[in-house]
Amino acid sequence: MGLVTTATTPTHPLVEKHASALDEAAAALAARSFYTRYPESPSPRVYGEEAAGRGKAAYEAHLGKVFAALGDQPTDGATVGDEVSPYGPALGITYPHLDVDAAIAAAQAAMPAWRDAGARVRAAVCLEIVDAINQRSFEMAGAVMHTTGQPFVMAFQAAGPHAQDRALESIVAGLVEQERVPATVVWEKPAKDAPIRMQKDYRVVPRGIALVIGCNTFPTWNGYPGLFASLVTGNPVIVKPHPRAVLPLAISVEAARSVLRDAGFDPALVQLAAEADGEGLAKTLAERDEVRIIDYTGGPGFGAWLEENGAARGQLVYTEKAGVNSIVVDSTDNLRGVLGNLAFSLTLYSGQMCTTPQNIYVPREGVETDEGHLSFEEFGQRLAGAVQRLTGDDAKAVELLGATVNEGVRGNASGLAALAQEAGGTVVLDSREVSHPAYPEAVVRAPGLVAVDASREDVYTQECFGPVTYLIGTSGTDQALAQFRDTMREHGAMTAAVYSTSEEVLEQAREAAADAGVALSENLTGPVFVNQTAAFSDYHGTGANPAANAAYVDAAFVASRFRVVTSRRHV
Amino acid sequence: MGLVTTATTPTHPLVEKHASALDEAAAALAARSFYTRYPESPSPRVYGEEAAGRGKAAYEAHLGKVFAALGDQPTDGATVGDEVSPYGPALGITYPHLDVDAAIAAAQAAMPAWRDAGARVRAAVCLEIVDAINQRSFEMAGAVMHTTGQPFVMAFQAAGPHAQDRALESIVAGLVEQERVPATVVWEKPAKDAPIRMQKDYRVVPRGIALVIGCNTFPTWNGYPGLFASLVTGNPVIVKPHPRAVLPLAISVEAARSVLRDAGFDPALVQLAAEADGEGLAKTLAERDEVRIIDYTGGPGFGAWLEENGAARGQLVYTEKAGVNSIVVDSTDNLRGVLGNLAFSLTLYSGQMCTTPQNIYVPREGVETDEGHLSFEEFGQRLAGAVQRLTGDDAKAVELLGATVNEGVRGNASGLAALAQEAGGTVVLDSREVSHPAYPEAVVRAPGLVAVDASREDVYTQECFGPVTYLIGTSGTDQALAQFRDTMREHGAMTAAVYSTSEEVLEQAREAAADAGVALSENLTGPVFVNQTAAFSDYHGTGANPAANAAYVDAAFVASRFRVVTSRRHV
């Protein structure tokens, strides 16, 4: 218990360095206007002529080795790691296995100095970390491509700059929230004789150790918001990556530890808990009472366990699980735009985004378009054609599709005929096997479409992850909107969209989306896709339906990660 | 699904009426400075010459009758109610028993219009409700006195103006939080040719039905924060009072429903769920999936069940349970002030506040004071003397002590000798039975003091609710601070205090309080008591220890009660 003057503001050289960036980002977040710090283009004009080559080399230098950069983390001596690229090659990287007891002790020991550093110093250090990660975006692109199966450009953008912007968003959200609490106030209550005067000092304190449980498909994009929200609010973080996508978070943790060390803080504030496949380390860590915050992206079964286990321990648990993203097609004055936009949304990363549309409601009687009336079947054929055109050339297609991440996805993609038969539906477009010109072992699948009737809720209210989309025939837009609302409210969704030329239908769709608690994209026909959200402006998820209990990044995502402890005295 | 233009701001006559009050209160909350809207003095000069008499008559008019003012609530035809004043008389009031299915349907039906009214209209209506409740403060004082056992002035202040200020605090916290979300923005992303422009509308949506579970001792003070935080953020509220303290919340709900009706909203937004003792209605309601938010004050067993049940259902659960409030006495230059302040804190409402000190750590070697060195025993004797002086005159004492609320408290107060023997300690001051001059049946007990050794954690780390305080002998202030920190961190606490003339000890106490996650009062010797917190400035609880998972009122208490649903489109 050292002597600390709580009412003074701690400072650090990084505070001045990042002051304007933090202020700008905070203003953008408040306004929810366009803002980005990290350029999304992998162009040499942006990142430099040699960045791509250096990044590729840095990625390749990890292969077949022990990831030694975490060497000063407490380890039990074991190494783990059996990542295999969805494109074929085994990565051959092993990671030191964390000594959990020692890691927890180290995290706790690191906490007081980090707490006492104050919100602004923490935010500046966090931003320095993200800047350092940004410098490794090409290395990260390789790591993400070969653990998730994302195509290269997506791996660069989504796992690099877009994830980094989400991290910064999280940092400033946490900073703003903490700075809303005044450091000190003199409270003066009128009284008969002299007023009663008290000085009250308000101190932001962390909750304790935070655990981030990464997923296989978006280790950084889904990992950073929780990681930086917890870190900026004073909590040490243990990052438990998915055993098949360790490297992207290992690089991130290495960068964080290096910046923390250079900034004079204990690198134990961010630790990597790599595990062997099937080890169950996430459960082991979640069962530790020292863990006070958990951020999880993954399947609903373990997510529900984490929520209940966490409630029993007083942990704060943020989960993103599964859902049935839905689209209502009512009418359009730009059919080509609709088809192109939808085809791209379904194709991107073979539908392996938590935001990819799964259920597309189309009236059985068809759709009015600028190219005339299309029957349900015709609309399906036109969409199938758009997908086929976009993915017809293998060499080009793989740059959008990437590779399938696991056997579950491959099974879903292969089972369309059986699925259609069981559902009393038809295969409108089978999921085509695509050959990857550079990686012959990669299993690459283009989107498939299955037509089913709206009565078959047993089929389409379950998440079918990967390149499978249902075209759901309805009695009309009214039934479509009702199913759209009810299925998302009950089964969750991260995204929703509507196509209509009728302002009344659009308004009804807004009401349905509000009732279901899901964000709505209207008439997307251009370069914005329903499965993409922009940091600082679009909330990722709403927390208002079963797909996720949190949104990236609203105040609710950060406000509970710290607490305020007052000390008051007469003056 | 009606046509609503989401980007326009709804208005209402009450918005203008309350605009400046809401702005002032919001500014005070942001600054955490002194603010009150509702005068705490029951003086005729403040509330009018006839207010006290009218309020008493209004209270008495309820006795022996059916509480008919909720008559348009859906009821299953039963009436319930067996409130008995801790001062003796049975109240004889019965309440219509809610038809739960119909009530839930009514609440859900009322929600869309309330949601679409917008945050500012909701806040203005909520403030109008609190103003209406304020007009009934004397009636409320009677209702609270005769359900909780609080003495009259406390029943007036704590259950009236102080609770009303906490309600207003909650309203403006919710308002500010919702207004941080812009209604609409045009997002413009630079692109090669023309920029990409989208209009994004952000709509605040409620989570669903909120359940408030009231407690026996502070039905309004602990009930209003959750009630108004949920209501102002768009959620209909079902209020389930403690079966022995129904009337205060029945009056509150009646006032809310009347204002809602007059303001053009559905009174089903606030409903009372009175139950028979032992009926278990709180559990029945908590098991409904339509219930999305729960605020609970009460015992830790049911609180833990609510948290786990809520996690399984995705409910947001705020609980305030039990703790071991602690004080470290190290030294003082104002012994009379210390003793007077402590004696009052222990005496107020016979220690039946969730904020009353339970554990007072005193060095075995004694305390340095302005009246010389006092041994542990001498300090105990002096504190006992101060309590005796304050409570020696029965007629005056009952105005501070009130009456014991239930058999549990009476058992604790009667068992001091046995407790001391079991704990290897001594009874420093027995809990005196006080005769109430006006209510001979009331069981009134003055504070008792039991000296125990610091080694007997088995005794003093359990909450012993009521007029029982432990004087814990320690090897010195270092041990005292260590126990102070560890016991509150593990077992929870709502309040803590320290007395010391040493700046170093005070700083150590601040560190210990920060580690334990409890607010600290330093050297209180005047008219501010450790068990009192002021709305707009002091947080009630921190949410950082097991006593409560929330604080009245921080951003975390309101930010998760609503969600934001975006709709976006190209413009």
Image (spheres, coloured by chain):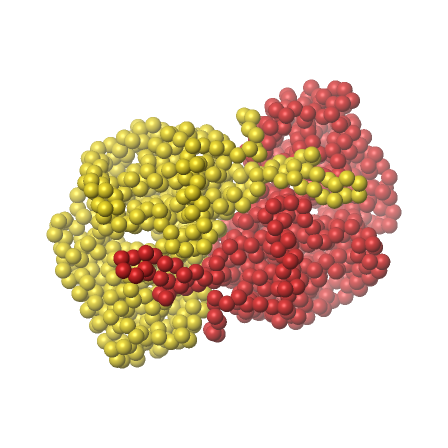
Chain colours: A yellow, B red
Q: Quadrant of residue B106?
A: bottom right
Residue B421 visible to the viewer = no
Q: Position of residue A312 (x, y in %)?
A: 50, 45
| Residue A286 or residue A239, whichever sits in front | A239
User: Could you tell me residue A132's position as x and y percent?
Assistant: 33, 38
Quarter holding the N terminus of chain A?
Answer: top right
> Is residue A198 visible from the viewing direction of this image?
yes
**Vertical arrangement, residue B544 with respect to residue B269, above or below:** above
Q: How many marks?
A: 0
Residue at the spot x=35%, y=41% of the render? Answer: A130
Please give the name of the residue rendered at 43% of the width and 57% of the height, measured from the top-left corner.
Answer: A542
**A17 and A204: which one is in front?**
A17
Residue under the image location 26 percent in, 37 percent down? A81
Q: Is residue A171 above or below residue B272?
A: above
Q: Can you tell which quarter of the image residue A566 is in?
A: top right
User: Going 28% across and 72% down the picture, which residue do you hit?
Assistant: A334
Residue sitting nearer the eye, B54 or B97 = B54
Q: Position of residue B476 (x, y in %)?
A: 64, 22
The C terminus of chain A lies in which quarter of the figure?
top right
**Left or right relative to B30: residue A155:** left
Left or right, A276 with reference to A122: left
User: Is residue A258 shown left or right of residue B248?
Assistant: left
Position of residue B97 relative to residue A272, above or below, is below
Residue A473 placement: quadrant: bottom left
Residue B362 screen position, x and y as percent: 68, 26
